[in-house]
Image (tube, rainbow, N blue to C red):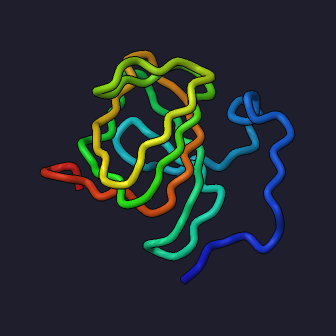
Amino acid sequence: MSDVNEIPIIIPSLMNVTTSGTLRWQPYREGIEIHQLYKHGEDGPSAAFLRYRPGARVPAHVHAGYEHILILSGSQIDQRGSHAAGTLIINPPGSGHDVHSPEGCTALAIWERPVQFVGNGA
């Protein structure tokens, strides 16, 4: 089943979109909400906004395809350091990490393929 939009997605003010009150947030993981922009099947590309509450974390996972993360507000931390608002992170296929956000953050995530959680993170 494909959830791809058949019309272009236009976001005129990306840095302010998450405070506009027009997004439909859904639970994603404990302390994290998601607003899906598009999703192409279970193994295809997708994009979403992620909103982390302070202290939220995504457990260890490996990237099956490229992952692009743009931090819109706040910051998040992984094994490579702390990434503040305005940072673009590109994780290549085969790379892995876990992510947490002590202060909370909002990010735009674009996945070539879904991540694969390892250990008890499924």
Q: Report the number of discs.
A: 0
Query: Please, is residue 81 above or below residue 31 in the view?
Result: above
Q: Nearer the viewer, residue 31 or 92?
A: 92
Residue 60 on image: x %, y %: 24, 43
Vertical comparison of 117 with 89: above or below:
below
Left or right position of 94 against 84:
left
> Where is 49 relative to 102, above or below?
below
In front of the other: 5 or 87: 87
In percent of width and height, residue 7 lies at 83, 68
Location of the N terminus (image quadrant): bottom right
Where in the figure is residue 4, as x and y percent of width and height? 66, 72
Q: Quarter holding the C terminus?
A: bottom left
Residue drawn at x 47%, y 21% as measured from the top left: 83
Residue 50: horizontal and vertical position, in percent? 53, 41
Residue found 43% across the figure and 24% down from its top: 76
- Answer with the quarter of the image where residue 53 lies: top left
**Residue 30: quarter of image:** top left
